[in-house]
Image (spheres, rainbow, N blue to C red):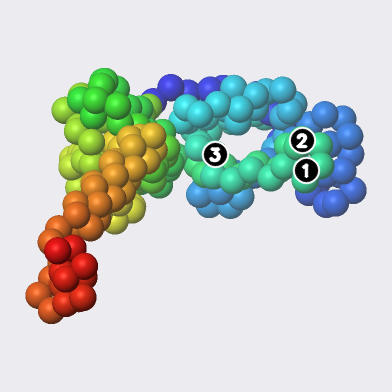
Amino acid sequence: MKSITINGSKRESVGKKSTKALRNAGQVPCVIYGGDTPLHFSAPELAFSKLVYTSKAHTVVVKLDSGEKLDAVLQDIQFHPVTDRILHIDFYQLFNDKPIAMNIPVNIVGNSIGVKMGGNLQKNQRKLRIKALPTNLPDYIEIDISKLEIGQRVYIREILNDSYTFLQPESTVVCQIRRARAALVEATLEDEDDEGSEETGDSKEAPADGAAAPAAPADGADDAAK
């Protein structure tokens, strides 16, 4: 997995006043968990652009002015509800012998048979949560849908991997090929036309047993004709 380097400064004071001063100066207060004690630091907001504003997963190398260098992954991020500025970031320290849980993006490849026949690809899961050692974390989880036909789905149980463990049920649907809505409407209209044709055909059949027969002419009518 690709790594992004963040250059930061270790924080000695973590009170509300110092945190507010950091934000006013364009710095983002951060904390790294997972070690013996939480480590607080700050870094310029622009330093996180490649880490936060992307759909790809990355690990992080935090380089501090104190000389410390830590490997970590992003765990949580808080944004301002109005301005969307980054308010705070939580990281989790990586250790080569400790598995880590992380959301990994799904990368779908191939042009499925179902799509070629007019179906639509539906992505049910754009990211999957896995647990693995840091060295086994993939950049993405690739799924080939070339052989997928209309109505078929890809489940997690079909993409299991020995290098990592999925933290979602194996019955979770990752993606599927659905019939296009226009095709569904057309099929419905055809069914209605077929039902209408059957009803029209029934109305032309002979009257059922017990139906009234045409009335015979009266006796006076025959005499008048003669």
Figure quadrant of residue 136: top left
Which amino acid type is marked by label 3? Leu
Which amino acid type is marked by label 2? Arg
Circles 2 and 1: CB distance less than 8 Å?
A: yes
Residue 73 locus on image (x, y percent): 50, 37
Q: In the orientation shown, which residue stands out farthest toward the front?
A: 226
Residue 119 locus on image (x, y percent): 30, 31
In the rendered structure, the answer to whether residue 10 lies left or right of residue 182 reads: right
Residues under labels 3 and 2: Cα distance?
A: 17 Å
Q: Quadrant of the N terminus?
A: top left
Residue sitting at x 61%, y 50%: 38
Residues under labels 2 and 1: Cα distance?
A: 5 Å
Q: Mark 3 — residue? A: 74
Residue sitting at x 87%, y 43%: 20
At label 2, counting other C-alpha atoms closer than 10 Å, the crowd grade (few under 14, some 14-19, many 20 or more) is some
Residue 14 locus on image (x, y percent): 78, 49
Q: Mark 1 — residue? A: 80
Q: Nearer the viewer, residue 68 or 25?
A: 25
Q: Mark 2 — residue? A: 85
Figure quadrant of residue 109: top left
Q: Is residue 29 visible?
A: no
Q: Earlier in the sequence, mark 1 or mark 3?
A: 3
Q: Secondary structure at mark 2?
A: loop
Q: Nearer the viewer, residue 36 or 30?
A: 30
